[in-house]
Amino acid sequence: MSTLSLRLPDSLVESTNRLAGLMHMTRSDYIRHALEDYNSKNEQVLYKKQLAESVQEVREQTDTELTEMDASVEDGLSDA
């Protein structure tokens, strides 16, 4: 396990100490859990962003293919 040194505002340290105590956790455990939750949420945000980008790419490709198919359907048809 690695050690990490941070500079935090006093008010954040105080609230972290208070909440960790209320939750019967060490400050390290409290901060570790907070970082795990934050990382998990950010992973979800990034996954959703990548998914939305992929959906948009597929949508654009589908629109292009449909346009090409519509144009090819009319190929060779005469105004009879």
Image (cartoon, grey):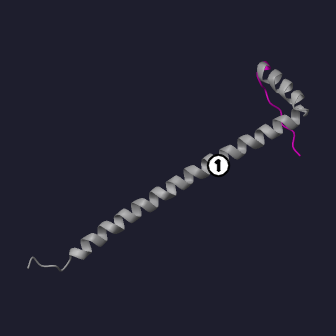
x and y, in percent, of residue 7 in the image: 78, 26
Residue 6 colored in magenta in the image: yes
Residues shaded magenta:
1-10
In this view, 47 is above or below 77 = above
Q: Is residue 50 above or below residue 72?
A: above
Q: Residues within 10 Å of mark 1 (few under 14, many from 20)?
A: few
Quadrant where the C terminus is found in the figure? bottom left
The residue depicted at 77 percent of the width and 25 percent of the height is 8
Q: Residue at x 66, y 44 (%)?
A: 42
> Relative to residue 2, is residue 79 drawn left or right?
left
Residue 33 in the image: state x and y as whole percent.
81, 40
Q: Quadrant of residue 10?
A: top right
Q: Residue at x 25, y 76 (%)?
A: 73
Horizontal and vertical percent position of residue 45: 61, 46
Where 35 sits versus 73, above or below? above
* Quarter of the figure with residue 11: top right
On the image, numbered disc 1 is attached to which residue? 44
Main secondary structure of the magenta stretch:
loop
* Up/down of 54 relative to 18, above or below: below
Image quarter of residue 57: bottom left
- Residue farthest along the top direction in this orientation: 10
Tag 1 secondary structure: helix
Residue 37: within the magenta?
no
